[in-house]
Image (cartoon, grey):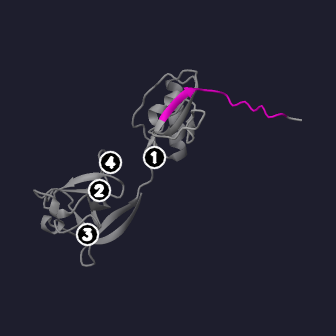
Amino acid sequence: MNTEKVTARRLTAQEVAELGPQDGIFVSAETEGLPLDCYAPANLSRPGKSFEGGSFTARTIFGDEIQLLPDNAEERGIWIADAAGEEIEVLQSAGILLNLALFVPGGDKESLDSLYTAAREAFGAGIVQRWSEEVVAVPEVKVDLFEEPIRGRKSPNGQNRDRRALDIYPTRVRFLEPSDGWKFVVEPHEEVVDDTPTI
């Protein structure tokens, strides 16, 4: 987690109402289930004058959208860079949250525990966490998973020209999302046979 010291001052609701989405602000970096004692760079989701009731919505550079009441003394409020202000700690980067699905052939609780222990030893006990655990039986079958445009142009032989192969294991589809404007196509797996004549 990388932070830096920034000199800033806390804004009142009236001052926030004068800001626009292009103005850089700092809000609490705390997220659900992850109490961080610092701030994150952010912007208002729309002009401050468009909000009513003293409640504002801001989006941090990490993609979190939060509701704020600047005048509430129990909240950390909204801050803006100001050389005459006070020093606050601002989060610059916090690594990557990786949602990982693992296939363990012949897996049981013992092998999963061994895998978890090895991952914690490799990356650190404070880095590797079990957020959710689900055991799914994986059939011994393969499919060809493609992605193709939703309104793709068809070639004379009836196949979509623009198509990209993604995977061959059906259970992984549960952890994927199609790209914008694309859809998944699942077909029976066909082994690639190279029938190029050899000398």
Task: Please give the residue where the numbered disc 1 appears in the rendered image.
Answer: 127
Circle 1: is it few (<14), some (14-19), or many (20+) Cα within 10 Å? few
On screen, residue 94 above or below 157: below
Please provide percent x and percent y for residue 103. 54, 30
**Residue beneath label 3, please?**
80
**Mark earlier in primary sequence (1, 2):** 2
Residue at coordinates 60% horizontally, 26% vertically from top-left? 189
Residue 138, horizontal then vertical, whole percent: 52, 23
As for residue 102 lying within the magenta part, the answer is: no
Q: Relative to residue 117, is residue 69 depicted above or below?
A: below
Residue 170: x percent and y percent? Answer: 52, 28
Q: Position of residue 120 (x, y in %)?
A: 50, 42
Extreme residue in the bottom direction: 84
Marks 3 and 1: which is nearer the front? Answer: 3
Q: Which residue is mark 4?
A: 34
The N terminus - image quarter: bottom left
Q: Marks 2 and 4: CB-CB under 8 Å?
A: no
Of marks 3 and 1, which one's residue comes earlier in the chain? 3
> What is the secondary structure assignment of the residue under circle 2?
strand
- Label 3 vs 2, first from the N-terminus: 2
Give me the residue at 51% from left, 32% from top: 185
Nearer mark to the viewer, of 3 and 2: 2
Q: Nearer the viewer, residue 138 or 178?
A: 178
Residue 59, which numbered label?
2
Would you say residue 188 sits in the magenta stretch? yes
| Helix, strand or loop under label 3 | strand
- The answer to whether mark 3 and mark 4 are in CB contact below 8 A is no
Q: Earlier in the sequence, mark 2 or mark 4?
A: 4
Occupied quadrant, residue 180: top left
Q: Tell me the magenta residue range.
A: 184-197
Marks 3/4: CA–CA distance: 23 Å
Q: Which mark is residue 94?
A: none
